[in-house]
Image (cartoon, rainbow, N blue to C red):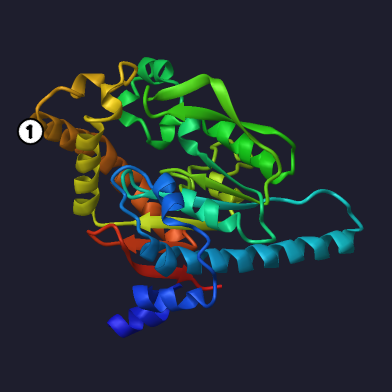
Amino acid sequence: MDERVAILSPYHRFTRSEWAALRADTPLTLSLDDLSKLRSLNDPISLEEVVAIYLPLSRLLALYVAATQGLFKATQRFLGAEDGKMPYIIGVAGSVAVGKSTLSRVMRALLSRWPNTPKVELITTDGFLYPNAVLEAEGLMEKKGFPESYDGAALLRFLHDVKAGTRNVRAPVYSHLTYDVVSEESVIVDRPDILIVEGLNVLLPGRPPRDGRPSAFVSDFFDFSVYLHADEADLEQWYVERFLRLRQTSFRDPRSYFRKYADVGEAEATAVARDIWTKINLRNLHDNILPTRARANLVLTKGASHSVEMVELRKL
């Protein structure tokens, strides 16, 4: 049965060592100092992890992007068109605490060092969350991160404009310190070679409108997508560990939304973290995030040590 399932799988499956061998002669362009600036809190990614997992991925994506650029130029010649380039958009999905931010920042750094993609931008969908005032008014604060807590229309407009080659497209900014959208700030995305879009629910297909009108989903704009996966027990442990570490760092800032947890005891803080995980993050994982795993082009599965142990690449 296992052999039959493997044969019928839409994915090529690789062990860590098999995937690492696909690096070929791709050079390591990040230093240990670079990596220390890119990793997220409580995500102990190493240079060995970059070499084994992210260099082969950057090589694969460089090949995909080059092929897409060639197809775009061929289409331009066929149409006799001279319109500008269209950016290659990569979606990164996965649970809270799984390491999406570190993955996205490392891939941005690696891909920007390839000669045909010097301009790589990164945005997170956190900026498209509704402000806390709106969430509170709608009774959605305990569903923050769920699909209904985002301004989906604004995110779709943003992706549409970027994909259309519009200049200087603005994306809103989110502060993990204040736990809210920063209304006076924005990020400018100006026709990049690659745009990485990181978010919990970016692969969610959504529901078609009842009136029969055409609709688009966020993933429609992706040229490639990555799902970062880990066991639920590991995710919960990583979330709790991060929460406890934040008590000693950003929670102590008077502006922090979670300032009230900075001085509570470890046992109480652990209980609070597990409660938040169970009521919000685990429920969101079950209902909205994990079901989208099968829609990804690439699935990276982490073990308890945070290292990727298996890679699944969708067959073309």
Q: Assign a secondary structure to mark 1.
A: helix
Residue beneath the point at 54% across and 37% down: 210
Q: Residues within 10 Å of mark 1 (few under 14, many from 20)?
A: few
Q: Is residue 123 above or below residue 222?
A: above
**Which x, y percent locates residue 67?**
69, 68
Q: Which residue is mark 1?
A: 267
Q: Quadrant of the N terminus?
A: bottom left
Residue beneath the point at 22% across and 30% down: 248
Relative horizontal placement of residue 53, taking residue 243 as reference (left or right): right
Q: Is residue 97 above or below residue 52?
A: above
Q: Is residue 138 above or below residue 215?
A: above
Relative horizontal placement of residue 105, taking residue 155 as reference (left or right): left
Residue beneath the point at 43% across and 18% down: 134
Q: Quadrant of the C terminus?
A: bottom right
**Which x, y percent locates residue 32?**
41, 55
Relative horizontal placement of residue 147, taking residue 240 as reference (left or right): right
Snapshot quadrant of residue 275: top left
Determine if residue 101 is in view.
no
Residue pushed farthest right?
80
Q: How many marks?
A: 1
**Which x, y percent locates residue 158?**
62, 36
**Which x, y percent locates residue 179?**
37, 25
Determine if residue 130 is in view.
yes
For this rendering, which residue is in front, 306 or 35?
A: 35
